[in-house]
Amino acid sequence: MTPAPNVIYLADHSVVLALPAVIPALLIALVVIVIVVRDRRAERAENAENELKDANEREDTA
C-alpha cells in the first residue's frame, strides 16, 4: 500500500497527540518568563531610584 505521490503529511500522529501536553507547558513557561522580566525591571527601577536618592543626599551634605 503506497500513498499517492501528491500526498503531503502535515503532522505525525504522535505530534498531534502531544499537543495537549505541550501547549499548557509552553503557556506556563511563558507566564513564568513574563513574571521574571517584570520583577527584574521593577528591581532595576527601584535600585536606580535609591541611587538617585543617595546622590541627592550626598549633594545636600556637601
Image: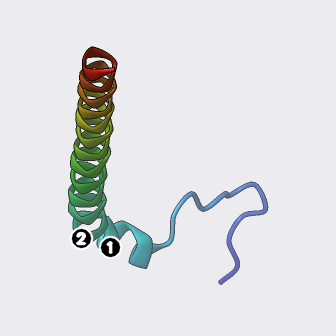
Q: Amino acid at mark 1?
A: Ala
Establish if 4 lies above or below 40: below
Q: How many marks?
A: 2
Say which of 38 and 16 sits in front.
38
Residues packed near mark 1 inside 10 Å, few (<14), some (14 to 19) or many (20 plus): few
Establish if 15 lies above or below 39: below
Q: Is residue 36 left or right of residue 12?
A: left
The reply to whether discs 2 and 1 touch (Cβ–Cβ < 8 Å) is: yes
Residue depicted at x 60% and y 62%: 9
- Cα–Cα span, label 2 and label 1: 6 Å
Q: Is residue 35 left or right of residue 48?
A: left
User: Label 2's element?
Assistant: helix
Residue depicted at x 57% and y 57%: 10
Residue that mark 2 sits on: 21
Residues packed near mark 2 inside 10 Å, few (<14), some (14 to 19) or many (20 plus): few
Q: Quadrant of residue 20?
A: bottom left
User: Where in the figure is residue 26, as x and y percent of width and height?
Assistant: 31, 59
Say which of 46 and 40 sits in front.
46
Say which of 33 and 2 sits in front.
33
Establish if 16 lies above or below 37: below
Q: Quadrant of the C terminus?
A: top left
Q: Residue furthest bottom?
A: 1
Residue depicted at x 27% and y 30%: 54
Q: Amino acid at mark 2?
A: Ala
User: Label 1's element?
Assistant: helix
Using the image, tell me which numbered label, if any, was put on residue 18: 1
